[in-house]
Image (cartoon, grey):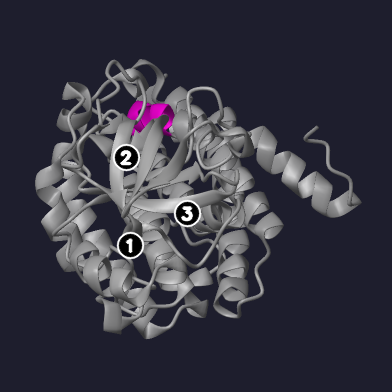
Amino acid sequence: MTIPVQSRAIVTDYYNIEEFFTPEQLAIRDAVQKWVNTRLKPIIDDYAQRAECPTHLIPEMAQLGVFGPFIPEVYGGAGLDYISYGLIMQEIEAGDSGIRSIASVQSSLVMYPIWKFGSEAQRQKYLPRLARGEIIGCFGLTEPNHGSNPAGMESYFYEEGDYYVLNGRKMWISNAPFADIAIVWAKDSEDKIRGLIVERGMEGFHTPEIPRKWSLRASATGELVMDRVRVPKENLLPGVEGLKGPLSCLNSARYGIAWGAIGAAIDCYRVAVQYSLERTQFGKPIASFQLTQRKIAEMLTEITKAQLLALRLGQLMNAGRATPAQISLAKRNNVAMALEVARTARQILGGMGITGDYPIMRHMMNLESVITYEGTHEIHLLITGQDITGISAFV
């Protein structure tokens, strides 16, 4: 006997969290969601299979306002709040983590430091063009020998007339292969970490792409190679020195990731529930089996917890009260949640879960990178532990 399945909406906002959002925030979310559904999702699996970045979408993303949405309007941004920024990241990552990375890097790792630490001339020169997508940026902190320990960076620069001469190498840099500018963090002659705006075309500056990735295949990832690059002195970010500069940028990016991961989880969850309602075994849909329902219920439970965590963090960000440790907790929890949801969803789809006909395996592979970049899962755990105990376990 076959049990009929009634068509029903798949609920992803189980606690009606949407009621906490303003009409403007909901309108922003819906606009980005529509773009993702109509422009990104129909093509992203093909681009991921070919390991190509759909850069033709960048002007559309700029038109949508996803680059630097929290940057003041006077500099070309939308002047939005941080919950709006989070919702934008959530909806883009429901399409693909790599495409969210483009927006994340542009907003939090390139526009943010220029806005916070740059001179007024730098803000006027770069921010409006970055917001319009006329130029794309990248962020150079991680090095081949220094990932979780950025203080050990080997990149350095020294004065030579009207220029700084920059040497070093950065690794695992999103957007690098096509970026027009790079925010590069390096040590000066006094061993202080400073930020420099490096432009494509400067002699000795190269951005080779990293090939053969299994993860973030629709995102362009590369290196920054700097061999005696002469950077004009006016390209030094004057407003910060030390690790405070790059780490504050990472806090902004990590906040966006905490929201973005929810989008990937929701996309996997929706696909798994729909599949379980349509796929029949032993004369009935697999959604009717207890173990499948357990998987579905646990996925939605974890998504709901992550949504509440992100909402509260967004409220704290808007109030200027969110701490780096609180951001770390949300990034670590929500990305781990999304990766587990992706793995569970893959199990529900069985063999079909590994095919390109469904987005689950692509999300899962992407999240294997997201759980590592912008601070590894373990590093964020230690940040939380230090905040709780007052004792550093890093060294």
| Along the line of sight, the residue nearer the viewer: 286 or 384 | 384
| Along the line of sight, the residue nearer the viewer: 328 or 131 | 131
Residue 66, relative to residue 161: is it above or below? below
Circle nearer the N terminus (1, 2): 2
Q: Residue at x 20, y 36 (%)?
A: 203
Q: Residue at x 28, y 43 (%)?
A: 230
* Range drawn in magenta: 359-366
Q: Can you identify the residue that label 1 sits on?
A: 234
| Residue type for callout 2 | Gly
Q: How would you classify the magenta stretch by its main secondary structure?
A: helix
Is residue 91 shown in magenta? no
Residue 290, relative to residue 338: is it above or below? above
Q: Can you identify the residue that label 2 sits on?
A: 98
Q: Is residue 39 left or right of residue 355?
A: left
Q: Are marks 2 and 3 in contact (CB under 8 Å)?
A: no
Using the numbered discs, state the Cα–Cα distance from disc 3 to disc 1 in whole angstroms: 26 Å
Image quarter (top left, top right, bottom left or bottom right) of the C terminus: top right
Q: Position of residue 165 (x, y in %)?
A: 36, 41
Q: Residue at x 15, y 67 (%)?
A: 63
Circle nearer the N terminus (3, 1): 1
| Along the line of sight, the residue nearer the viewer: 85 or 231 | 231
Q: Can you identify the residue that label 3 sits on?
A: 253
Q: Residue at x 44, y 77 (%)?
A: 81
Using the numbered discs, state the Cα–Cα distance from disc 1 to disc 2 in whole angstroms: 32 Å
Circle nearer the N terminus (2, 3): 2
Q: Position of residue 274 (x, y in %)?
A: 35, 41
| Residue type for callout 1 | Glu
| Residue lying furthest left | 56
